[in-house]
Amino acid sequence: MPRLLAIETSGSVCSAAVSIDGSLISSSEILRSNVHDEMLAGLVCDVCSYADIALADIDIVAVSAGPGSFTGLRIGASFAKGLCFASTSVHLLAVPTHVALMAAGLEVAQLAAVPEIVCAIGSHRDLLYISQTSSSDLDVTASATLLTVAEGKESLNGRNALVVGPAAGALTTSPVSGLSRLSARFVAYAAWIMLSKGSSWSDPNTFVPDYHQEFQPR
């Protein structure tokens, strides 16, 4: 049974989870900003201990790959790549942050009979990364488009969509609180869907996260 370690550091949450053969076994998170570097290793050890497996037994490391904060993504990516470099049997899977957030909204959207899920992640100023998928079949290859808040609102006109993500409040007056921030358990869930759809492993030698627009040179 494949044993998967999921890591989330793309935003304010620092989180890790263990999922075995598609089932969540353990999960832990810290809702404090600027502690990722200090706390991630301890969280990983904790979730492995709670799952009663050794870190050396992990087969897959799934890491949230952005868009997200430069510092957070760098920490998560470095940790995940280090685990892969330490063992040739560990596979790396980069999970787009917006795909993980949309995966988290699948059950809610399906229960509410909402046909679409839209993810909104803040960039800088009034810019948002917007992505979308059908609620009946997660698009694991969905891209994130940079739009202004006004353009994002305009794109939702006349559409029945569940809005998720940390910037959901910029597009809707009633965001679902549990779907406004990412957790490693959502990364794990999205990872299994990606693998079931034939997604390829990421190369730890060349993998670079998708950093926020605000950290690009202006």
Image (tube, rainbow, N blue to C red):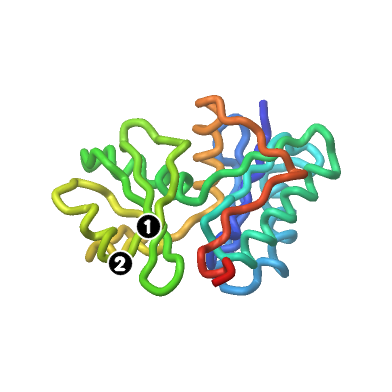
How far across and how far down the image is residue 106, in percent? Answer: 36, 41
Q: Are marks 1 and 2 in contact (CB under 8 Å)?
A: yes
Task: Name the side, left or right, on which 36 lies relative to 179.
Answer: right
Task: Name the side, left or right, on which 90 lies relative to 47.
Answer: right
- The structure residue drawn at horizontal position 67% and vertical position 26%, both measured from the top left corner, is 1
* Residue beneath disc 1: 120
* Relative to 134, residue 71 above or below: below
- The structure residue drawn at horizontal position 60% and vertical position 39%, both measured from the top left corner, is 19
**Number of numbered callouts drawn:** 2
Where residue 22 sits, quadrant-wise, is top right
Q: Mark 2 belongs to which amino acid?
A: Ala
* Viewer-side residue, 51 vs 55: 55
* Residue beneath disc 2: 170
How far across and how far down the image is residue 84, in percent? Answer: 78, 42
Q: Mark 1 belongs to which amino acid?
A: Ala
Task: Name the side, left or right, on which 150 lies relative to 213.
Answer: left
Task: Name the side, left or right, on which 183 lies relative to 55.
Answer: left
* Viewer-side residue, 198 vs 3: 198
As drawn, the residue found furthest toward the left would be: 158
How far across and how far down the image is residue 97, in percent? Answer: 50, 51
Could you classify mark 1 by the number of other residues whose Cα lies within 10 Å: few (under 14), some (14-19), or many (20 or more)? many
Q: Which mark is first along the chain, 2 or 1?
A: 1
Q: Name the quadrant of the C terminus.
A: bottom right
- The structure residue drawn at horizontal position 36% and vertical position 31%, both measured from the top left corner, is 137
Q: Secondary structure at mark 1?
A: strand
Where residue 129 sits, quadrant-wise, is bottom left
- The structure residue drawn at horizontal position 14% and vertical position 49%, both measured from the top left corner, is 158
